Image: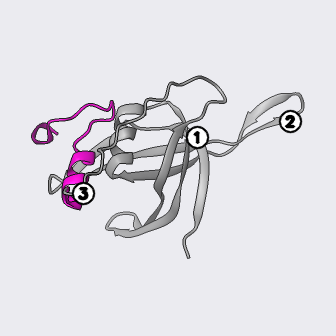
Amino acid sequence: MDAMVWITGNVGTEVESRTVRDEFVYASFRLASTPRSWRAGEWSDGETTWLGVTCSKTLAKNVLASVKKGDPVVVVGRLRTSRWEDAEKGAQSRLTIEAIAVGHDLSGGVATFQRITRPVVDEKDTVAELIQATESQDPTGQEADVAAA
């Protein structure tokens, strides 16, 4: 069973990307979520929770084009824990969200949505051709040069 979560916060790092085998794009960033509460007539901040956020394929391309450090966002995805051993610090762990949706938190600002175009399905097109056509688009909806990506 997956632990599905949604969380609001601010993008705490620049969005990083990597491409694997010229096919799949991955994007990641750190998310800072700080609870605020109203006490004794003033706002106070609680402890900040830091989470890693990872995205893949079309979501990754769209996040790369749309999200920057400091942006307020809403992230929905699967909660994961990564564990490793560090020679100096010992056992380490980090919470990560494998995102299925990322969007700007509009409670403090406005945004404009631009839909990407999907290829029209032709009976003679193969699934591989359709995937290639979709993945080769940049988030502005224009055909991208796959070799340059």
Residue 29 sits in quarter: top left
Q: Which residue is mark 2?
A: 39
Residue at image location 54% in from the left, 71% down from the top: 2
* Mark number displayed over residue 86: none
Q: Secondary structure at mark 3?
A: loop
Q: Position of residue 8 (x, y in %)?
A: 61, 43
Give neighbour class at mark 3: few <14, some 14-19, many 20+ (Cα, 10 Å): few
User: Is residue 66 positioned above or below 57 on the image?
Assistant: above
In primary-sequence order, the first of circles 1 and 2 is 1
Magenta part of the chain: 125-149
For disc 3, the marked residue is: 123
Tag shown at residue 9: 1
| Kind of residue at badge 3 | Glu
Q: Residues within 10 Å of mark 1 (few under 14, many from 20)?
A: many
Closer-to-camera residue (41/123): 123
Within-10-Å neighbours for mark 2: few <14, some 14–19, many 20+: few
Judged by depth in the image, the label closer to the viewer, 3 or 2, is 3
The residue depicted at 50 percent of the width and 24 percent of the height is 112
- Report the amino acid beneath label 1: Gly
Q: Position of residue 114 (x, y in %)?
A: 43, 29
